[in-house]
Image (cartoon, grey):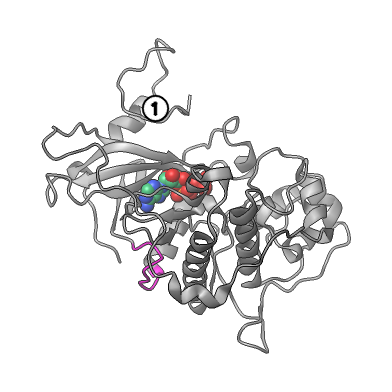
Amino acid sequence: MAPELYIDNIRALKVLGKGATGIVFLAHDTSSDPEARSSFALKVVQKSSLLHQHQHQHHHHHHKTADRRARWEMSVLSGLEAHPFLPSLLGSFEAHDLLGWAVPFCAGGDLNALRYQQTDHVFSQSAIKFYLAEIVCALDHLHSMRIAYRDLKPENVLVQSSGHVTLTDFDLSKKLSVVQRSDPDDEIIQLKPRRTSRMTRIFGYGSEGKTAKVSPENHRKMSFAGGERSDSFVGTEEYVSPEVVRGDAYAYGVDWWALGVLAYEMMYGRTPFRGKNRKETYQNVLLKRPAFVGKRTAWDLLTEVVRPPFVPSTDDGESSTEKLTTFDVREYFQEMRAPPSIPSAPSHSLSSSSDDLF
Ligand SMILES: Nc1ncnc2c1ncn2[C@@H]1O[C@H](COP(=O)(O)OP(=O)(O)OP(=O)(O)O)[C@@H](O)[C@H]1O
């Protein structure tokens, strides 16, 4: 188990990002690190919180489940064997209505944001090779622990201060139970009768969100509740593999498929199967042969790429001579819950993010 964090000792420096389940803060422990020299990313989830449906339409099917998703993600993280490209759980806390855990702060942002900073929104061949090679290592390590990651996309690949990658967002990860094992590289899971109405049901969702995901623990319940969603349907639509679209048994191959989509996107600046809507995207996943133009990546040169292509600058504007402006995570959540008396006037400049929850 990860060491226990004491929320009374924790101060946040800023909001790093907001997801469907929680808020990620840059934070430090005032008792062990008063100068905030080794701040960390702290993901905080409100227990029994309703996810805001208007904000997260693509997540509408798992409102009420934020803390269950969080506990699942925390348990996956705590079970991970150490790896340079996977997050280590630094600590966790639970306080009345909040649940949180700390992982190393990744100062370089995510691969999607980084790609948009590049000329023509595409990475160089050497950068692509570097990132793919590291992601392959991370996925291979997860698979060796029998974990399918199931949500590989550039937004979930963070860049550490060193320039190396870290996979984030493990709430969709799944420990595979092996039904059949003929070849170690071909573990088949979730074998079940294929339903003929599967495709129409999938194509009938009609949500506009990019992500169509169901938490590992809750989709089973959901499939009973609505009769709409199969428990094997997970991932983000542009990265989802044909076997998942079809509702077939699947295994670690879903991660390698997503890696191919990610490779294409880094190279061409767009994903290969994206359609006008979800239905068209899935049709493309099943039927379309992606167009490849230009030269193939020369993988024999991989050994030449030993240094990270981008190393985030260490000066993040918070030099030690300045007084740190910090805030309490619990107060942040309290303010968020409180009905705004003057809607346009922010009470504090707590959040650097513009997409406030209200
Ligand atoms: N270790 C980290 N270092 C720096 N930033 C981080 C870190 N972890 C998360 N973030 C930021 O916080 C954002 C939200 O984190 P995360 O994706 O884990 O939340 P989430 O609730 O699981 O989101 P979703 O499930 O909607 O993708 C990320 O997009 C990223 O910008």
Whole-percent x, y for residue 115 in the image: 52, 48
Residue that carries the numbered disc 1 in the rendered image: 336
Residue drawn at x 50%, y 63% is: 126
**Quarter where residue 103 is shown:** bottom left
Type of residue at label 1? Met
> Quick one: label 1, few (<14), some, or many (20+) residues within 10 Å?
few
Q: Nearer the viewer, residue 208 or 53?
A: 208
| Residue lying furthest top | 342
Does residue 131 show up? yes
Asked if the magenta segment contains residue 80, the reply would be yes
Count numbered badges in the picture.
1
| Residue lying furthest front | 295
Asked if the magenta segment contains residue 190, the reply would be no
- Would you say 205 lies left or right of 74 here? right
- Would you say 106 lies left or right of 182 here? left
Residue drawn at x 17%, y 39% is: 319
- Would you say 205 lies left or right of 328 here? right
Does residue 66 show up? no
Relative to 93, residue 338 above or below: above
Q: Nearer the viewer, residue 214 or 163?
A: 163
Whole-percent x, y for residue 340 in the image: 41, 16
- The local secondary structure at tag 1 comes to helix
Residue drawn at x 49%, y 51% is: 111
**Quarter where residue 317 is shown:** top left
Whole-percent x, y for residue 160 in the image: 36, 56
Residue drawn at x 30%, y 43% is: 26
* Disc 1 within 8 angstroms of ligand 1 (CB): no
Q: Which range of residues does the magenta coloring cover?
A: 79-88
| Residue lying furthest bottom | 182
